[in-house]
Image: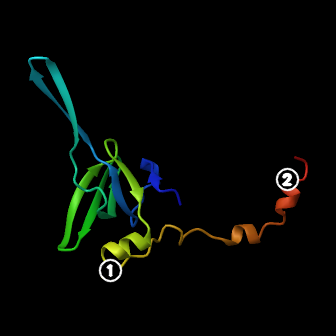
Amino acid sequence: MKRKLEMDDVRVGMYITVLKGKMEQKIFLTPEGPIIKKQEKYNLNGKILEVVALDMPYMLVTCHESFGTRKESLDLRVIEVMALSQEYIHNFLPDLELRKDSFFDEVSDSSVEDSDTTIEEIFKDL
């Protein structure tokens, strides 16, 4: 699985984190001219976020922390997210029970087994 996720890659049940938050730009006027400073707005980088609802481009996540949980609404147009490994999650919060990602439950893996063509036949003329 790729780590950095595009908006369409995010699904309910995934454990993700913010890779890059929304950037805020502030302009300070100085005698030498204006100075532009950029700063990330969100403080969710590296936190364990469980996606609980999606209504693109927005997602609702549960932020799991050592002192409890809280809900956050995030706009996927202004942030970058990445998938988290189970190892990272268990090292961050050893007592957190991970929910099973049911995304592939409805996918039938027998479609390849039931086909009457082999991969060699498909690519033999290439």
> Mark 1 Cα within 10 Å, few/some/many (few <14, many 20+)?
few
Q: Amino acid at mark 2?
A: Phe
Q: Position of residue 98 (x, y in %)?
A: 37, 77
Above or below for 121 versus 34: below
Return the residue found at the far right. Answer: 125
Residue 68 rendering spot, x and y as whole percentages: 19, 73
Residue ID at (58%, 68%): 107
Q: What residue is shown with label 1? A: 94
Residue at x-position 27% and y-position 51%: 74
Question: Which mark sits nearer the N-terminus, 2 or 1?
Answer: 1
Is 106 positioned to the left or the right of 75 in the image? Answer: right
* 126 on left or right of 26: right
SS for callout 2: helix
- In the depicted structure, whether residue 10 falls above or below residue 63: above
Q: Which residue is mark 2?
A: 123
Where is residue 39? Give x, y as percent. Answer: 22, 40
